[in-house]
Amino acid sequence: MIQFDAKAKIVISDSLSEDIFAILQEESASDIVIITDASVADNPSIKKLKLFLESKFKIRYETIKVVEPTTDIVNKYTSEFRKNPPDLLIGIGGGSTLDLVKALSVMILHEGPVEDYHGTGKPFTRGIRKILIPTTAGTGSEVTKGAVLVNEKTKFKRAIGGKYVTADYAVLNADLTITMPDTVTACTGMDALAHSVESYTAKCSNEITRMYSLQAFSLIYNSLPKIFEDKNNLEYRRNVLLGSNLAGFAIYNSDTGACHALSYPLGIYNHVPHGFAVATLFPEVVAINVGKGCNLYADLYDRIAGAPRLENPAEKSAAFAKMIASYKPLSYLGKKFRDYGIDETKIDFLAERGLDLKSALNNNPIEFTFEDSKSAFLKVIGGK
Ligand SMILES: [Fe+2]
């Protein structure tokens, strides 16, 4: 059996205020909470949206600053909003903000702390309707079913999920991504690119998810480098935002792979932003997979504009690994692992903990061992 699950209604928006207003009318919402990432709170389009909505609805605001959403943060806001739940939530920001809003949308209507619902915990039976508006083009959180949360006491990074966690509307407005600094464009864009590639080669992929993955890869790979030359070009921004969204649908249904497994301990133990961790590890993981005989990258190679014509899957996959390693956005990441306090002494620990996220690791197209994990961390930490 092949299945493809897609709950969120996608709105590609050219006029944010009018498009959000139309959704709120459709939803008959009157009491609305808007949660905004602090880094975009001064964005002119977002300010205009808030002013417009204030004149029509009862609006409550929260502005938050969060690198990775934690269970403690979710529990704090949950207790605040349980006293007076809104009709509808609007989340505006990067993946961390959107994941927080997704978690709140269910936790406000359920009892107990969010830790009770982690993993195989209690199921969610309802959720507050929500609109998610990404301001980065990377995580695909606006359509995925999980809200990834870090438990700082147990050092676990896990998702709560299900249909009530997933957004009801994902509004894509490329204007909002123009103010991203180059480093954020590069890190989040590389995360989205990794989603498209890992979901394509995933063991859990199927013919529908691969269709989404291929189109996502094509949109992101061919447009992301051009953004750094022409920052206000809305066509490139829109391509990457839509590609990120399609890749979100793909990972929703077929999950990721070894690169995402390896990235997890970096966020938990060293507070390395997810996009940076994925971007840095991704070329190494692709090279290891190809080195061990994985030739599944051929169709992706064929989507690269202007790539030399090659004949067989092995040649194409080898060339693909080289093109990923020299991909221009990698030169805009801005930092190195050492900037997060990570050096050679951490390699064995990270290589071991990088094998913990079994759902992603076992979804890698080939077996990914401790030696492979160590090799990837050695390259990105030891060699630079
Ligand atoms: Fe990711």
Image (tube, grey):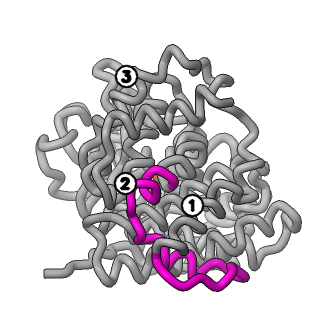
Secondary structure beneath disc 1?
helix
Q: Amino acid at mark 3?
A: Glu
Badge 3: few (under 14), some or many (20 or more) residues near its Cα, within 10 Å? few
Range of the magenta residues? 287-313
Q: Is residue 358 left or right of residue 221?
A: left
Q: Is mark 2 within 8 Å of ligand 1?
A: no
Q: Is residue 305 magenta?
A: yes
The residue under label 1 is 321
The residue under label 2 is 257
Q: Is residue 106 visible?
A: yes
Residue 180 in the image, given as x and y percentages of width and height: 75, 53
Badge 2: few (under 14), some or many (20 or more) residues near its Cα, within 10 Å? many
Q: Who is closer to the viewer here, 55 or 374?
A: 374
Q: Amino acid at mark 1?
A: Ala
Give the quarter of the figure containing the N terminus: bottom left
Closer to the chain start, of discs 2 and 1, is 2
The residue under label 3 is 152
- C-alpha gap between disc 2 and disc 3: 24 Å
Mark number displayed over residue 36 = none
Closer to the chain start, of discs 2 and 3, is 3
